[in-house]
Amino acid sequence: MAGLIKREDIDLVRERSDLKEIVDAFVTLRSAGVGSYKGLCPFHDERSPSFHVRPSVGTYHCFGCGESGDAIAFLMKMEHTTFAETVERLAARASIELHYEDGGSGPDKEQVGRRQRLLEANKIADEYFRDQLGTPGAATGQQFLAGRGFTSEHAQHFGVGYAPQGWDNLLKHLQRKGFREDELKLTGLFSEGQRGIYDRFRGRLVWPIRDMTGATIGFGARKLFEDDPGPKYLNTPETGLYKKSQVLYGIDLAKRNIAKKRQLVVVEGYTDVMAAHLSGVDTAVATCGTAFGSDHVKIARRLISDDGTGGEIIFTFDGDAAGQKAALRAFEEDNKFLAKTFVAVEPSGMDPCDLRQDKGPEAVVALIDSRRPLFEFAIKAGMKNFNLDTVEGRTGALRHAAPIVAGIRDSVVRPGYERELAGWLGMEPATVHRAVQSAQRAAASPASGHRRGHSGDGRSAGHGTAGDAGRPGGAGPGFQRPDVRDPAARMEKEALEVVLQQPTLLSAEQWQAFYAADFKVPAYAVIHSGIRAAGMAGATPSQWVEQVRQEVPVELGSLVSELAVTPLPARTSEDLVRYCRDIMNRLFELQITHQKGDLMGRLQRLGPQGDPAEFAALNRQLVDLEMKRRSLRARD
């Protein structure tokens, strides 16, 4: 059995792991000041970004839910791996050789985590399928791709492969790679019969389904032969890696463009994703055998940094009844976005793949450009169910449409759609306006199950900002959260932020003064003691914060992380140096003020009849403190 990883190796892994690069694979981060980044938290659903990352100290903290930690903690929570597995993955990524206590060694193939074995099996299968696409046996698959305008280079770019006909081609290949049957049963790559397991994908084109890190977690396969009794498209079943409600095909290729353009286009199939990207719509993804649901919403919102300041989600659907039904299902999720949601429907029923083939790449771009607001589509689609030639039909259509119009977030756009709706129904605008207002009141009622969960100006109800005194992630059950409205508490907080984030900017004299400072706020006083116990000597910035976390009670660990990532108000490096100097000087001046107050109290208690020598000594101390105070002022 493997021994414990040595502490110095863990520290080295922590030091060499680029936290921003790791988090970037899951969350779109934007600059939040010098050396600071923020984005939507991956650990809870939020509308305003409160997840902060400071790579220089290797720490993240969410001001919304309180989650915090370093690169190891982040991957453990995102990938559901053990501490040792996570350290080993990061070590391999950074080319670090790990050493183990008691002469132990790292896990061999029999001891790696189940998830790692599943990933390895999928990776090998991915490579195998891609190699097979170039063989004579894949001629039918090659013809299928060519018939839809895709070259071998296109197939290579999207990782398209071919599962050869036969029952055990992939099975034997993976067994030769050292995989046991009990492991292979968990991959979703095989079906099981009376004679054992056999290849699930046979005689089909295969598309790899990858997560945002680019790791292959499943496959989608398209039928090519008439004698294949299976469905037209066959996907990997649910496994420890593959959850169809949580994956989007093409996300690994599109994520950077989605984040850059703040646009996500949802198409219906694998070839549609290919056609869209090759046409210049490089923000396209597709669901995998399921409707676009709430888990997909979370992925989309994090990528486009859905904070109400921009961004758009565009759904493309066929113009038939099934396409309309899919669009309306998507509309049900619309209230979970702050971004604007649209639908692009091709009137003749062509999907992006057919459109690119028939009319060229520009037609695919034109389809996306022709997008209409999703709520407009939902209104008109629902109105088709009513006979607008009758009073009863128009009344029913109004009852259908009024809640949709009431849910439009933009208070400037909403009256315009009230007028449009009045024209479509042939009703007085005042009548439609009253119906919309009634729908708004019903949606706002606590008894209603239709609250949209956000205010009319696009801000989330009930979510504070990073500056809220009552935000979660506080000091813990044993400590009262400091009230930073108190000037002294705020001063102590700002000083701790500087010391945790920029320890190398402090001079030896400043460190000495900081260690001698007397912190009054209980939680901050404990962290101050933890900093003194941790000792900065020899520690890198990322090791420094972790050492401090280790020296404070566990309930204060989150507060340490919060202080370590709170953006400092500086736009340039020069501003940062000046800010840190000013904060430390203000802290020391505050300490001097406290010390002078204590000395003045002692003088008053001593009185005129007191010891002259003690009286003189106290006065000399007061003069020395005043000289220090003036010296600090002169440095500003």
Image (tube, rainbow, N blue to C red):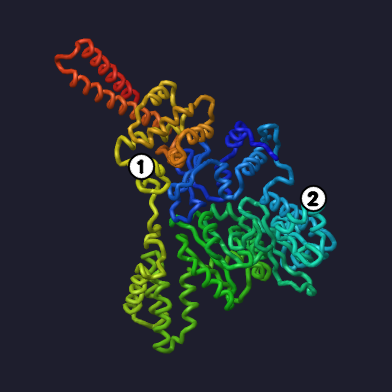
Which mark sits nearer the N-terminus, 2 or 1? 2
Q: Residue 260: image x %, image y %?
A: 54, 52
Q: Label 1: how many residues lie within 10 Å, few (<14), some (14-19) or many (20+)?
A: few
Disc 2 element: loop
Is residue 33 at least partly visible in the picture?
A: no
Q: Is residue 569 left or right of residue 324?
A: left
Q: Residue 517: image x %, image y %?
A: 36, 26
**What is the quadrant of the C terminus in the image?**
top left
Please give the label number shown on residue 177. Answer: 2
Q: Nearer the viewer, mark 2 or mark 1?
A: 1
Residue at figure coordinates x 41%, y 70% from the top left: 449
Choose top left, top right, bottom left or bottom right for residue 284: bottom right
Vertically, is 507 above or below 567?
Answer: above
Residue at figure coordinates x 53%, y 58% from the top left: 300
Give the amino acid type for the residue marked by disc 1 in the picture: Gln
Task: Compute the Cα span from label 2 to label 1.
Answer: 57 Å
Q: Label 2: how many residues lie within 10 Å, few (<14), some (14-19) or many (20+)?
A: few
Q: Nearer the viewer, residue 8 or 360?
A: 8
Quickly name the residue at label 1: 480
Q: Residue 363: image x %, image y %?
A: 61, 67
Q: Nearer the viewer, residue 62 or 136?
A: 62
Q: Residue furthest right?
A: 136
Q: Nearer the viewer, residue 36 or 111?
A: 111
Vertically, is 14 above or below 197?
Answer: above
Q: Residue 126: image x %, image y %?
A: 73, 55
Residue at figure coordinates x 40%, y 46% from the top left: 466
